Image (cartoon, rainbow, N blue to C red):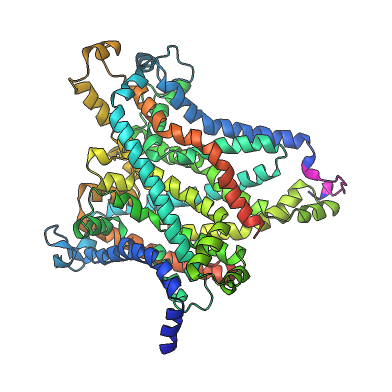
Amino acid sequence: MSKKKKAEFAPSRSEKKTFGQYVLCLVLLLYTIACALPILLVFVAAFTDDKWIAQNGFSFFPGKWSMAGFNSVLRYGDSLITSYGITIFVTVVGTLFGLLVMSMFAYSISRKGFRLAGFLSIYLLIPMLFNGGQLSGYIVFTNWYHLKDSLLLLILPLSVTTMNVIILRTYIVNSIPGELMEAAKIDGAGEYRTFFQIVLPLLKPSLAAVGFMLATSYWNDWQNAMLYITTKKKYPLQLLLVNIQNSIQFLLNNTNVPASVRAAMGGSIPEYSSIMATVLVVIGPIMVAYPFFQKYFIKGLTVGSVKG
Amino acid sequence: MKEFLRNTWKHRAHVVMALPAFLILFFIMYVPMLGISLAFKDYKTSLGIFGSEWNGLENFKFLITSKRIFLRMTSNTLMYYGIFTVVGTVLNVGLAIAIDQCVFKKATKTMQTVMIIPVFISYAAVQFIVNAFLHYDNGIINNTFGTDIKFYTEAGVQFWPLILTIIKIWKDTGYGAVLYMSVLAGVDSSLYEAAEIDGANRWRKIWHISLPALIPMITVMLLLSVGSIMKSDTGLFYQVTRNVGALHETTQVIDSYVFHAVKTSSNIGFTAATSLFQSVVGLLLMLFANGVVRKVHPDNALF
């Protein structure tokens, strides 16, 4: 290392495109491709002829393309749309609700001179240190609250997490000057008004970051759904996916499928390609929406620390 | 006391604002803590948590009679925690620094978008992708390498630690790096310029500026993870392995066992005892780790 200790007087080194930079870029590119390949496989397999997969196996370069997988997904379109609705509802409501509730809590415990804040901080920390476990949670939620099969159990358990409150509180303490709140008070703004009109807008970067993580955990939650949701009409996407194998079996045995459709599918429901088609339908929208959203997300995290 | 009440009244708006989260934590996190008593009870659904008879340490005897299962899932839990934490931290930090150093900003931005995408794919979906690779007849691995491995049977059991680690890396590294990148983005660029004038090359700048800037965040992340040593990503171990019994030797962790037991309402006593064990060990480790951090890096301690 010390051998290269020669002063370089380039105005800004980060502009220089050295050989090392190309190597670095290439390594990153290879890793990116490795990340993308499994997803690409979903795309390809969803449009591959099912019999071809059964004979030759999954491949990035299939010998025969087909839309049969997608056609069979359309067959259970209704339950797919219902599940979409449930997942979007839970994600949107849960994220907004969680952000509001957590930022209010974070704001309260960050107030200086608020004597109860110490107790509330400890109260917030304890669940991170110790919890009753899945078993007692299950018994309490179903036998005491009688919430089995209720969407509330998809929303509430994920809405408040200690970690997220800490992130929000840290941001409030470090990045929102207390003088602002005092100035608002002098100008006659009440506590609620101060919070909603001054603190919340300034909290945006942090809210974006936390909200993003929260939304992801809602969208991907299959555990609570699998434990608590029993009615088909309340299945979120992930549960539909977990049960897809059964659904396809159901289609195979369902005599209501018109003969013409069966004939078009060659007498059988394509198994491999239709599963991949369903996976694609479940993960597709996020992949399409995410790049637009990424700007806000990464900015949210970075702006937070730059201006800190 | 009177003064305390006056203070609380003065801050009543703050009490009101804290209330919703307070109640959610109470009903979702605190009330189920009562269920810990199940570890010392002979649980009958009809009698409920309070109504069921105490049976002393009877449930813990199961831990000894089912020692093999108990030890197996505990050691698997610890093993995967170790692998994921070490590999994960190194790769997250490495990727963050690599992206931060790369001068092709536009290209890296696009690549980063792709790297982060896997985190959005739930394990419920991942299992199908993994299956496309590992399927015995039609899987990419067996077809490409001409191998003949039945991954989902006893014959494939030794491959799963590697498989699960690769999946974990694929899924979480892009996302994990963002946090560290945000810290790097916050480093004052005049530091780098000053180092440059002093003749530091790229590696020295990484070593003396970037890494030290990341240390506090790494410490906090490691500390937080110590408290969850006994917890695992249930989806990875339950969904991706399809909870195949033959694979439990290397893939069953405490959380996936408990999840399955709760779902099928089986072995309540054993599960309750295991849960208590899990919670208590987690608590002790968290207190320990926080104590250490408070000594070394007081600013980063959680409490």
**Along the line of sight, which residue is nearer the eye, B150 or A251?**
A251
- Residue furthest front as drawn: A188
**Along the line of sight, which residue is nearer the eye, B137 or A279?**
A279
Task: Locate the N terminus of chain B by quadrant.
Answer: bottom left
* Residue B226 point in image, percent of width and height: 47, 59
**Along the line of sight, which residue is nearer the eye, A115 or A143?**
A115
Q: Is residue B53 above or below residue A299?
A: below
* Residue A53 point in image, percent of width and height: 38, 17
Residue at the (52%, 72%) spot, across then down: A111
Can residue B114 be seen here? yes
* Residue A82 point in image, percent of width and height: 30, 35
- Residue furthest left as drawn: B46
Residue at the (77%, 43%) spot, across then down: A14
Region of the chain picked out in magenta, as a range: A3-14
* Residue B116 point in image, percent of width and height: 53, 40
Can residue B180 be seen here? no
The part of the image, by quadrant, that contains residue A98 is: bottom left
Q: Is the magenta stretch mostly helix, strand or loop?
A: loop
Q: In this view, does B298 lie above or below A150?
A: below
Residue at the (28%, 32%) spot, across then down: A79
Q: Is residue B28 left or right of residue B218?
A: left
Q: In this view, does B294 lie to the left or right of A5?
A: left
Q: Is residue A248 magenta?
A: no
The part of the image, by quadrant, that contains residue B239 is: top left
Q: Is residue A151 above or below residue A47?
A: below
Residue at the (60%, 35%) spot, across then down: B111
